[in-house]
Amino acid sequence: MTKLVDLDWENLGFDYMELPYRYRAHYKDGQWHTAGLTEDATIAINEGSPVFHYGQAAFEGLKAYRCKDGSINLFRPDQNAARMQRSCQRLLMPEIPTDMFIDALKQVVKANEAYVPPYGSGGTLYLRPNIIGVGPNIGVHPASEYIFTVFAMPVGNYFKGGLKPTNFLAANYDRAAHKGTGQSKVGGNYAASLLPGAKAKEQGFADCIYLDPLEHKKIEEVGSANFFGITNNNEFVTPKSPSILPSVTKYSLLYLAKERLGLETKETDIYLDDLDHLVEAGACGTAAVITPIGGFQIGDDLHVFYSQTEVGPVTKKLYDELTGIQFGDKEAPEGWIVKVD
Ligand code: PLP
Ligand code: COI
């Protein structure tokens, strides 16, 4: 095993760190030209690049996990490749083939292996694949050239406190429309979430939870994670909506809740005026992992789920099952783990 660099592995936050290597590929004349790994963390592009003006950009987020035996796992990277292909279709960008996507991830992890946090530290190597439309352009039309990049950094908790419940605020803004780009992981959705997210944080909340853009009566998702709840009759429920991001973590939890915990599972409407039937709630995603939601501020009312200080028992079991699989301690369903070797 490569000797690790000297970092405070137990106390990593979720902050940018420039690592030695990243992957680059360039799309031109209808095909991908692979540049491979580079030490250059900057990208110089034409001022007319559509990424600057019209937000022609999509990204992904996934992690590499250090196992007890020192080996490294990727968790369901094919799902991120597929979602990035759907994001590219939505923004008229060229798709990155799954093999090329996974090969890029492996190259970046291997080249930066000294930064993959040790087993048991709670840290992981976060991978950020990213595609942008570049080249001279001024009208509203797609770029003729694209850059695909994958960079990485060691991270800890996204929401402070990890498994300690935290409070969220019901947003007064929408981030995506039903026939818009909410299902795609594209930059514009996150630009739209900056103001509501900042307002929520100013008031002491971890982030905001968006409501359905038609009536603002149902829960949609957190700006960086999906929402789930555990009902008083032991169901795992999560919102069904055309404007939320199909989370790899959420679909993994739907499977684990049913197959490993024996819960009923449902993607369904979750109404603000019917939250009492949820005995636990959480935010789930690659960065968020599972973050228990203690309180949910809706207007003047703070709705408290299981507890504001303690994670609920079902949420804890789901967390243990999910992270046990990711770090190689529990048996993974077929195809979920890809080894970096
Ligand atoms: N929803 C949004 C808006 C996100 O940015 C993310 C993060 O990727 C998620 C949900 C969770 O998705 P995943 O579990 O695939 O990371
Ligand atoms: C992720 O969980 O990977 C995300 O992309 C969330 C966020 C940091 C925007």
Image (cartoon, rainbow, N blue to C red):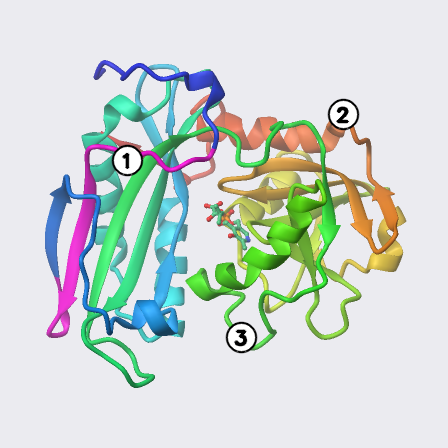
- In the image, what residue occupies the spot 36% across and 50% down? 78
Q: Nearer the viewer, residue 242 or 137?
A: 137
Query: Separation of disc 3 and disc 2 at Cα?
Result: 37 Å
Q: Which mark is residue 160?
A: none
- What residue is drawn where x is 57% and y is 29%? 321
Secondary-structure class at tag 2: loop
Q: Measured along the vertical axis of the image, is residue 98 above or below residue 121? A: below
Residue 267 place in picture, x, y as percent: 68, 57
Can you say whether 125 is above or below 242 in the image?
A: above
Amino acid at circle 2: Glu
Q: Which residue is mark 1?
A: 18
From mark 2 to mark 1, how far is it between C-alphas? Answer: 35 Å
Asked if disc 3 and disc 2 are in contact, CB closer than 8 Å, the reply is no
Quadrant in the picture for residue 282? top right
For marks 3 and 2 on the same chain, the one whose residue lies earlier in the sequence: 3
Identify the residue under disc 2: 310
Q: Is residue 266 visible?
A: no
User: Callout 1: few (<14), some (14-19), or many (20+) C-alpha neighbours within 10 Å?
Assistant: some
Pointer 2 with pointer 1, Cβ within 8 A? no
- Tally of numbered tags: 3
Based on the picture, tell me whether residue 257 belongs to the magenta stretch: no
Q: Which one is in front in this view, the residue at disc 2 or the one at disc 1?
A: 1
Instruction: Tell me the crowding category of disc 2: few under 14, some 14 to 19, or many 20 or more residues within 10 angstroms, Cα based.
Output: some
Quadrant in which the C terminus appears:
top left
**Element type where label 3 sits in the image:** loop
Residue name at image x 29 percent, y 60 percent: 131
Q: Is residue 3 left or right of residue 61?
A: left
Where does the magenta region start and end? 14-32
The label shown at residue 180 is: 3
Q: Is 319 situated left or right of 168 in this image?
A: left
Can you tell which quarter of the image residue 97 is in? Answer: bottom left
Disc 1 residue type (three-letter):
Glu
